[in-house]
Image (spheres, rainbow, N blue to C red):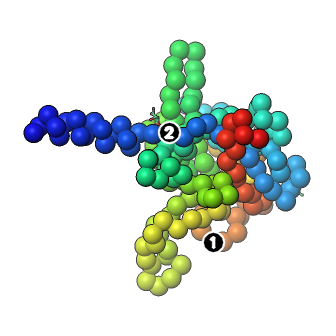
């Protein structure tokens, strides 16, 4: 009986640990400099990467994957592989918040809770949320899709870049450089 349970647990763990095929993240924006570019992981500290605005050439874009489940292949955590000289570490995207701003920074860091992202039927990336505090009383919602992506000039531990960012809440971003952006998944060799 114990043996069966052990096998079952292993099978469940194996089923849970799935990864999508690699894809690029493409920016769709009203700003012609940003529109059609691909995001790439850029250094924001030791083993910490943000998502910088890259070029319009796919070669310079990084590959990302979605750590997902069999039952929900289009939701999970956005994963990126940090490669060093003699190591590889899988990191997932988290939203870094700072009390001074309503703009959160997506960062890949080892060992942090990931943001729960998804891709809709148009391959647009969203974040799944479970809280609505815009009403009295605040209530839980069942995995609502939010698309509050921005491109902004951001500052993190000494690094200033043009990066992907996230608007926290309904109010407009206080960072004056922010512009709305749509993030689209483009599978590798698919464009
Ligand atoms: C993402 O999934 C892959 C494949 O299952 C796994 O090797 C990797 O450790 C996962 N990444 C994280 C940060 O959990
Ligand atoms: C377009 O985006 C670029 C790069 O982020 C930025 O430097 C520029 O100010 C933006 N243009 C407008 C009109 O906002």
Q: Is residue 111 visible?
A: yes
In the image, 169: left or right of 162?
left
- Looking at the picture, does residue 78 appear above or below residue 97? above
The one nearer the camera, 62 or 41, is 62
Label 1 crowding class (10 Å Cα cut-off): few <14, some 14-19, many 20+? Answer: few
Q: What SS does tag 1 mark?
A: loop
**For discs 2 and 1, the disc positioned in front in the rendered view:** 2
Place of residue 179 in the rendered image (x, y in percent of width and height, measured from the top left): 78, 59
Q: Residue at x 36, y 37 (%)?
A: 14
Q: Tell how many labels.
A: 2
Residue 25 falls in image quadrant: top right
Q: Which mark is residue 19?
A: 2
The span from disc 2 to disc 1 (Cα, nearest Å) is 32 Å
Place of residue 21 in the rendered image (x, y in percent of width and height, measured from the top left): 58, 37
N-term mark: 2 or 1: 2
Marks 2 and 1 in Cβ contact (< 8 Å): no
Q: Residue at x 82, y 36 (%)?
A: 57
Residue 121 falls in image quadrant: bottom right
- Looking at the picture, does residue 147 appear above or below residue 54? below
Q: Which mark is residue 31?
A: none
Q: Which mark is residue 170?
A: 1
Please identify the quadrant where the N terminus is shown. top left
In the image, 158: left or right of 135?
right
Residue at the outermost left position:
1
The one nearer the camera, 157 or 142, is 142
Q: Is residue 49 visible?
A: no
Place of residue 89 in the rendered image (x, y in percent of width and height, measured from the top left): 50, 28
Q: Residue at x 49, y 76 (%)?
A: 133
Please identify the quadrant where the C terminus is shown. top right
Ligand 1 contact, mark 2 (Cβ < 8 Å): yes
């Amino acid at each position: 009986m114990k043996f069966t349970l052990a096998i079952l647990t292993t099978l469940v763990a194996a089923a849970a640990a799935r990864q999508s095929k690699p894809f690029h993240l493409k920016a769709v924006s009203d700003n012609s400099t940003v529109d059609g570019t691909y995001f790439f992981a850029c250094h924001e500290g030791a083993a910490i990467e943000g998502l910088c605005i890259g070029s319009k050439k796919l070669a310079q874009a990084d590959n990302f994957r979605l750590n997902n489940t069999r039952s929900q292949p289009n939701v999970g955590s956005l994963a990126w592989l940090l490669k060093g000289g003699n190591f590889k570490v899988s990191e997932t995207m988290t939203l870094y918040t700072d009390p001074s701003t309503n703009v959160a920074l997506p960062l890949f860091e080892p060992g942090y809770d990931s943001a729960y992202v998804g891709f809709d039927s148009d391959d647009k990336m969203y974040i799944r949320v479970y809280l609505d505090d815009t009403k009295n009383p605040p209530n839980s919602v069942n995995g609502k899709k939010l698309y509050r992506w921005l491109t902004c000039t951001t500052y993190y531990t000494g690094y200033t870049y043009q990066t992907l960012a996230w608007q926290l809440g309904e109010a407009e971003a206080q960072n004056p450089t922010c512009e709305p952006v749509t993030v689209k998944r483009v599978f590798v060799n698919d464009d």
